[in-house]
Image: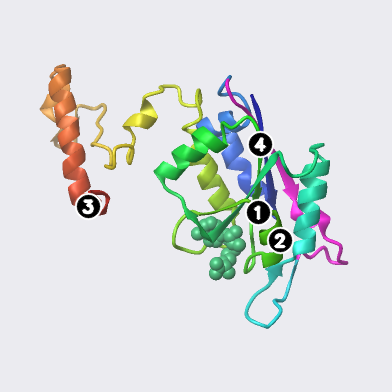
Amino acid sequence: MNKKIWILTLFPEYFKPLLECGISGQAFRGERSESVKFEINFVNIRDYSTTKYRSVDDSPFGGGPGMVMRADILRDALIKGVVDAGAYNGLDKLHVIYTSPRGRVWNNKVAREFGTEVLSHPEKDIVFICGRYEGVDERFLLKYVNEFYSVGDFVLTGGELAVMTMLDSAVRFVPGILGNKLSSEYDSFEDGMIEYPQYTKPQEFEGMPVPEVLLSGHHKKIEEWQKEQKKLMTQKLRPDLLPK
Ligand SMILES: C[S@@+](CC[C@H](N)C(=O)[O-])C[C@H]1O[C@@H](n2cnc3c(N)ncnc32)[C@H](O)[C@@H]1O
């Protein structure tokens, strides 16, 4: 299955590492999975400006600090840059997402859902709108956006890092992307706890040995130790994750 992702941004260069490095790079270059072949396309919002100085924003009606991205320019970037350029028959086959502090808060559960349902969904391609300045004219959001996501209760200077965070954490759940199918199941948050501590060579580091049980070769005991460590680490470091 082919899955196109369109990213509307003022800074396409922000995404270079996502596309060039590691597992996400291979995944989004379409090299990682046979079941889902990704193709990422960038639309520079500034290319759709109609003003002399190629601006895409203007001051807010009613006053207030900062500038707001114009609805008409974003609409043109979406319709001409995605719908027309991608030869879509309207917006029906596109799922338009705006990242914003007002959105559904992203976490591992949402990332899994997004990876298995939205990224692996054969029907629709995805469009991300990356906000900048003070955000986007409400009328564009009302008319064209299907879903809103926030990556946390803080304010970024732009939506690019939010989109990369979403894509990087969700693509791990797309079938065929991770080499070892089990590795996402063993990662933090999967069973409501953080991961147990990990060790590798050398066997002793600055006077600290590796816990004996891990060298025992006794799989059941190792598993019990790992389970126990998960609980202890979660109680100590992330007690908020445990049931009240
Ligand atoms: C400086 S922020 C605008 C913040 C906006 N004035 C507010 O108070 O909610 C610029 C852009 O960064 C993105 N952004 C900021 N924080 C975000 C977050 N926590 N999650 C997702 N996107 C965020 C949004 O696209 C936003 O339009």
* Label 3 element class: helix
Q: Is residue 173 above or below residue 241?
A: above
Q: CA distance from mark 3 to mark 4?
A: 39 Å
Q: Which residue is mark 2?
A: 140
Mark 4, secondary structure of its residue: loop
Q: Does the segment drawn in magenta span residue 39?
A: yes
Q: Nearer the viewer, mark 2 or mark 3?
A: 2
Q: Residues within 10 Å of mark 3 (few under 14, many from 20)?
A: some
Q: What residue is pinned by disc 1?
A: 145
Q: Residue at x 64, y 24 (%)?
A: 1
Q: Are marks 2 and 1 in contact (CB under 8 Å)?
A: yes
Q: Which mark is residue 124?
A: 4
97 lies above or below 111:
below
Q: CA distance from mark 1 to mark 4?
A: 14 Å
Q: Position of residue 38 (x, y in %)?
A: 63, 30
Q: Position of residue 11 (x, y in %)?
A: 68, 53
The amino acid type found where label 3 is placed reads Pro
Tell me if residue 156 can be seen. Answer: no
Q: Amino acid at mark 2?
A: Phe
User: 133 or 94, which lies in front?
Assistant: 94
The earlier-in-sequence mark between 4 and 2 is: 4
**Left of 84 or right of it: where is 58?**
left
Q: Is mark 2 within 8 Å of ligand 1?
A: no
